[in-house]
Image (spheres, rainbow, N blue to C red):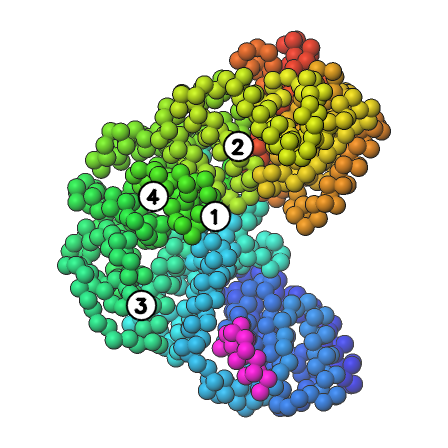
Amino acid sequence: MGQAALLDTARTTLRQRLKAERQLVFQAFQEDGKPEKLLRSLRQVVDGVLLDAWQAAGLPEHTALVGVGGYGRGELFPYSDVDLLILLGQPADAITQARLEGLVQLLWDLGLEIGHSIRTVDECLSESAADITVQTSLLEARLVTGSAPLFEELQRRYRDALDPQAFFQAKTAEMRLRHAKHEYTAFALEPNVKESPGALRDLQVILWVAKAAGLADTFGQLATRGLITRMEARQLLEKESAFKDIRIRLHLHTKRREDRLVFDVQTAIAGTLGLTASGEGPDARRASEFLMQRYYWAAKTVTQLNTILLQNIEAQLFPQPSVAIPISAHFTQVGSLIDVVADDTFEKHPSAILELFVAMTERRELKGMTARATRALWHARTFIDEAFRADPGNKALFLRVLQAPRGLVHALRRMNEFGILGRYLPAFRKIVGQMQHDLFHVYTVDQHIMMVVRNLRRFTMPEHAHEYPFCSQLIADFHDRWLLYVAALFHDIAKGRGGDHSKLGMIDARGFCREHGISEEDTELVVFLVEQHLTMSTVAQKQDLSDPDVIQAFAAVVKDERHLTALYLLTVADIRGTSPKVWNAWKAKLLEDLYKVTLRVLGGEPHSADRELRTRQKEALATLRLFGLDANAHEALWKQLDVAYFLRHDASDIAWQTRALVDKVDADKPVVRARLAPIGEGLQVAVYVKDQPDLFARICSYFDRKNFSILDAKIHTTRHGYALDSFLVADENFAGSYRDIISLIEHELCSQLLSQEPLPALVRGRLSRVARTFPITPTVELRPDERGQFHVLSIAANDRMGLLYAIASVLARYRLNLHTAKIMTLGERVEDVFLIDGPALNNPRTQVQLETDLLDALKV
């Protein structure tokens, strides 16, 4: 039989055999749930198929088929690549090259996802020296079939060339970069079970560096060598098995190589593990929450043991004179690391647990802990009990950590990772690993709190002053800034208990402050911040900041400059700590504007409409003079504008719009002007046209068609019947080609307003993956404003393309006038507020029907 015929026969028989045997392995796993057995069985199935395929390909004797990477390690996940090295004794001639191509094509035709390379031994060594990834894959090389002497030559020469010290440094640097990519936390709501900190890759790094150093091939051997204890080795094996189990289930559920525990699959994976939901009402917990909390606790264990092991291996590879310099009765300094004087230091002196963190924050030369100190601390958390928490000395030590001049974030993160923070603050322990399904937080509750503390600390650091200069300026003059960190620790500590977490957290915060001897004045500030931590963002993003009554009411809440500044700093840090997608320049401007105008009111300056109007007009005129406009050029437009217009626009906006309309006050055609928004993000679009029905809906339909997000809308009607509307729109493509986009908007939107075509039909945009998994029930609330002049329409729903146009279409159908629109997007959730009026709102039945129609428009 010829070579081609052999390959064709193999192609048919091996494809069927591979499919059938894989299916049997999957069925066996469904029955026994043993991850190690599945990984081994799948590898054996593929080994057998590769052996037959190799024989069919008819390659020369002095060649070998080598498994590398995970497959070389002897395990294969259901949909992972099969990493192969085809090892040549000499460069391939034409016949060998043809047979190699036939083999590779055959393997792909069989349905194997292969990652392959074809190299000689010399080429392997050259690539290994240049690429740490290749060097790592060869570390786990395994002969599948072919020439054993050739494979042994590769193994021998690879070992001779391997530098264990350089390998250790390269792999740990690689690990740090990977951790940075995942923001140094295992507690993301959608972790990668292979790559996230504390996951499978961290376990593999341990064994890679240990094997390269010739220390051990397994966790059991590491325990035999004294690098970890037997109990720790068992813990690592248990966590490794748990992660493998989840990864296998991910592959089988998605039927592809999927390593992320995304929201879509968490409930299904939890179900396959026998986890079910529990409770009812606000205390109900999803099955996915039990799964993820189990995952997070496992990842925390791996993180700690990874640190211990890598330090021990490093000590073996880079032996240093261990000169211990005493720094206290309980600790010494070894190099730049802190060490305990004895293995039982924490057992005999539990207060030393907090003393260690005080030392690390107060001694700049200390960069970390020795492996011995790390291990002792990991096992010491159980010594923190009621008596420990009641000890005045321990209370004082904990406050010293919070008041530390440096290192606070690292200290709190370590305390959380070691389970110490949750032991010292029992309320905090309840939120460790707790998920949040509000569609804008991307971290568990405890990690969000750590992010908020981190953000507050960054305000104090000169190297980060360029990020939030106004916050850095404010915190520099803030006395006892450590109180902000206390507030940050407690602001979300009551999440998941049911009820108002701000009120419940306030009680916890007050108890902490009184137990720790914090003065009544400072206690009041901390309690205020916890109770009101959502207030400033709500006022800034949902209420009309041009309304003096809104500012006066907010000023009455904050009472003085110290409370206002503290609340502003906490609010910025809090929003920034939810998700990278939630914060934007527009929200920053709203908060800063609210801060500044409230500060003026607190300083005794009345927030009167007349004063504000004169100030803005004066600043706008000063800007107009810079552009050489005639001193009276503005008058024709300004006499058509009322007080509300000037109060709702900045002086720069007023000057920009005046320049654009100075000779077009009675224009017959629409005027559309756009510019880069002064806040540094998005485009500002002004529309000036004779007022017409459905105008807002028509403009929204245009932006919707262009996939622009509307961040803000200011709607105004002049005294002579023109609409002067301003929109802030955003799109990720603006930065690179904003001039072209500005020209396009000015031309196309003007043409659309001229055409007066019927409004386009509504297209219900699809929800995002996250929103589909955690849908929220849309809400519509319609109520008169405090003056009874307008109605306030509040809408909350899942975000999707076309949502604002859908709302605008309903308002147009009822012939309602829109005065302002506050568009607030929080991740996958929108909370929009509109100020509207119109004859239809005078009828209670019509109001009910309006709410019903809006709810229908919000449906997907």
Residue at 70%, 15% in the rendered image: 719
- Mark 4 is surrounded, within 10 Å at the Cα level, by few (under 14), some (14 to 19) or many (20 or more) other residues, namely some
Residue 735 image offset from top left, x and y in percent: 65, 48
Query: Marks 1 and 2: in contact by CB < 8 Å?
Result: no
What predominant SS class does the magenta segment belong to? helix
Image location (x, y in percent) of residue 683: 66, 39
| Residue at disc 2, secondary structure | helix
The residues bearing labels 3 and 1 have C-alpha atoms spaced at a distance of: 44 Å
Q: Is residue 29 visible from the viewing direction of this image?
A: yes
User: Given this view, does label 4 or label 1 mark the residue nearer the observer?
Assistant: 1
- The residue drawn where x is 69% and y is 87% is 92
Q: Earlier along the polypeptide chain: callout 4 or callout 2?
A: 4
Residue at screen point 41% across, 68% down: 206
Going 20% across and 56% down the picture, which residue do you hit? Answer: 346
Q: SS for tag 4?
A: helix
The amino acid type of the residue labelled 1 equals His
Vertical side of 77 occupied by 508: above or below: above
* Dot 4 and dot 3 residues touching (CB under 8 Å): no
Q: Is residue 851 magenta?
A: no
Task: Report the residue marked by disc 4.
Answer: 429
Which stretch appears magenta?
A: 122-139
Q: Amino acid at mark 3?
A: Ile
Q: What residue did someone put label 1 on?
A: 466
Q: How many neighbours does mark 1 have within 10 angstroms: few (below 14), some (14-19), or many (20 or more)?
A: few
Q: Please tell me whether mark 3 or mark 1 is closer to you in this view.
A: 1
Residue named by callout 3: 228
If you read the primary sequence from the N terminus, does the residue marked by circle 2 or circle 1 appear first?
Answer: 1
Q: Are marks 2 and 3 in contact (CB under 8 Å)?
A: no
